[in-house]
Amino acid sequence: MKILAIYSNKGGVGKTTAAVNLSFLAAEAGLKTLVCDLDPQSSASYYFRVKPKLRANAKGFHKGGKNINKSIKGTDYENLDILPADFTHRNLASTFNKLKRRKRRLNRILDPLRAEYNLIVLDCPPSISLLAENIFNVADYLLVPVIPTTLCLRTHLQLLSFLKKKKYDTNKVYAFFSLVDRRKKMHKEFIATISREFKGTLHKSIPSLSNIERMGINREPVPAFSPTSQAAKYYRVLWQDVKATLLD
């Protein structure tokens, strides 16, 4: 069983859309998959038409056990469950900070689920915090969406620097390009530079496409509501790259 965190310390880069579409494609491929929504905005929960509600709120979440099992919901798709977030997740870092082994609380919460699932996908909030350090400890891999812009590159460098400083394994960090516009010379130049200078960069990228934006209207993964679209095609190619590189 693998735990894959879709993580970035920058917001608006396509983390949730990647988490939703990749988890759907994993389930479609036959992997028993759980999406764990860790973002208090609950966007992944919204996309899967699941009410953002946890049993006993964040307090019940950090205790794990029966509260977690009762919070997990089925989605409309075979092999795919979700552990929703709610707004109390905004308190998770401060809650973990009061507990023993505060940087490994997610391990305690998710370890009992390893026997039930082939893949757990974490949809993560955009911050470097105590919650993020829990994510770094529990995840087998961090998959980081990177928009080919100066600011996004800067935040990715901050992430790598933090991981090295705190002695986390940077070899489990993989990046892919998100919201790409290949008509822009700058995007093409950034992709070439980052691909050359950073190890762990996947070659598949996700362009900026209207069907991805429509996920918020349809409240479905792109391959579910538009399976033959260009957007679905790009996510399928990215999934195959993720599967071959990280999961096989």
Image (cartoon, rainbow, N blue to C red):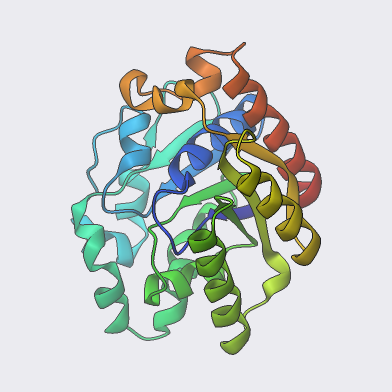
Residue 108, x across and y down, in percent: 46, 69
Q: Is residue 185 left or right of residue 43?
A: right
The quarter of the picture where residue 25 lies is top right
| Visible residue check, residue 53 | yes
Percent across and percent down for residue 13 are: 47, 48
Residue at the spot x=72%, y=31% of the render?
237
* Residue 1 in view (yes/no): no
The residue nearer to you, when weighing 184 against 117, is 184
Where residue 168 sits, quadrant-wise, is bottom right
Residue 83, given in percent of the width and then of the height, sits at 38, 45
Q: Is residue 124 left or right of residue 190?
A: left
- Give the residue displayed 51% in from the left and 17% down from the top: 224
Considering depth in this image, is 17 or 107 the residue closer to the camera?
17
Q: Residue at x 37, y 42 (%)?
A: 72
Q: Residue at x 63, y 83 (%)?
A: 164
* Relative height, residue 95 to residue 80 (above, below): below
Q: Is residue 98 above or below residue 124?
A: below
